[in-house]
Amino acid sequence: MEENKNNPEVIDLLEVFKTIWGKKKLFIKVWIVTFILACAYILPIPRTYTSELSLAPELGGQSGGGSLGDLAGMFGVNLNNIQTSDAFYPELYPDLMATNAFIVDLFDVRVKTLDGEVDTDYYTYLTKYQAKTFYKKPINWVKKQIRALISPKEERPNAGGTGGARFNPFMLSEETDQVVQSVRNLISCNVDKKTFVITISVEDQDPLICATMADSVRVRLQDFITKYRTSKARIDMNYYKQLTDSAQVEYQKALAEYSAYSDAHQNTILQAYLSERDELENKVGMKLNAYTTMATQYEAAKAKVQERTPSFTVMKAASVPIKAARPKRMIFVAAMLILATLGTIGFIFKNEVMKQMAQLK
């Protein structure tokens, strides 16, 4: 203590900590208030669950990088993409899943809550059966009114999609666009740059719907990739099918003409009739050869479609989660109490230091 008196720049930390220890009542008050406010904030927030699955797709080409490709993969460089003819490689899958077309395609998925009380399509579930935090409603209403005053927008109805679809991804209403934005936040896709393993996770307030949508996203992603990989082969297959059907019709027509002519001239021995019959027979043979050739090409095209159809290995299937993923209520309340304690200590420490410095002066 004598040294502290001789050195006016030294602050007695022991006195400061004694002062902090003497403020137990203040800490109790701060903890009570912080606990109440933290609970009031975190408890109304709905619990959400997360379902995750892993998928290993078949790549569109063979990599010739060997050990060089493996070494580059360690540094996040993908040589496979350079050496494959497939322009749609796995690293683009997250961008695909973020498009309006992909998300709108999920709106018609039939979902059912774990308790069985809600059984509807995904869009209706998102718009009518989502629990919301009560204290955010007035805030969102105020924000909406402010946006309306600053930049008023005309109401735009949803445009119907093609083929009887409910929505047109090209033109959505403001409400539907907001739903699309929320789905983007609920669905995530990550691709490992080295192994190309796709991890899809879906977040939702109901565990069963969460797992259902995760599996639906997987199915739709596989369908899209399959259609993309087999698009050229399917065009060729449809082309050869048309040629095969046309050749079959021509063959049947020639065969019917030959049969009718032969039946009508069974006892005829005139050379003119025999020549006409031989000509019709040759025509039937030519049409049969054409039909057989087209049928062979058609079968080869179908095999090509099967060859181009990628395979997917589900490494981890979607499952109904048991525990909620967030919010971490106990962790949040504990963190708020720790921050409040540190803040209170800092406040007391600051006041005590300023008091001591004033005394030293």
Image (tube, grey):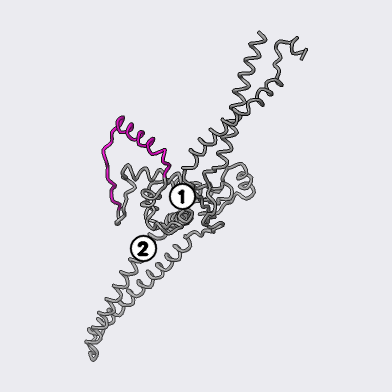
Regarding mark 1 in the picture, which secondary structure is present there?
loop
Magenta highlight on residue 108: no
* Residue closer to the observer: 214 or 301: 214
Quadrant placement of the C terminus: top right
- Extreme-front residue of the structure: 25
- Label 2 and label 1: CA atoms lie apart by 44 Å
Give the number of the disc on residue 238.
Answer: 2
Vertical order, 163 against 243 (above or below) = above
Residue at screen point 62% across, 50% down: 66
Quadrant of the image occupied by residue 136:
top left
Residue 268 rendering spot, x and y as whole percentages: 22, 89
Circle 1 residue: 205
Q: Is residue 166 visible?
A: yes
Are discs 2 and 1 less than 8 Å apart at CB? no
Residue at screen point 49% across, 42% down: 43
* Residue closer to the observer: 235 or 149: 149
Left/right placement of residue 112 relative to residue 360 reads: left
Mark 2 or mark 1, earlier in chain: 1
Residue 247 rendering spot, x and y as whole percentages: 32, 70
Vertical order, 157 against 233 (above or below) = above
Left/right placement of residue 21 relative to residue 102 reads: right
Q: Nearer the viewer, mark 2 or mark 1?
A: 1
Regarding mark 2 in the picture, which secondary structure is present there?
helix
Magenta segment range? 132-161
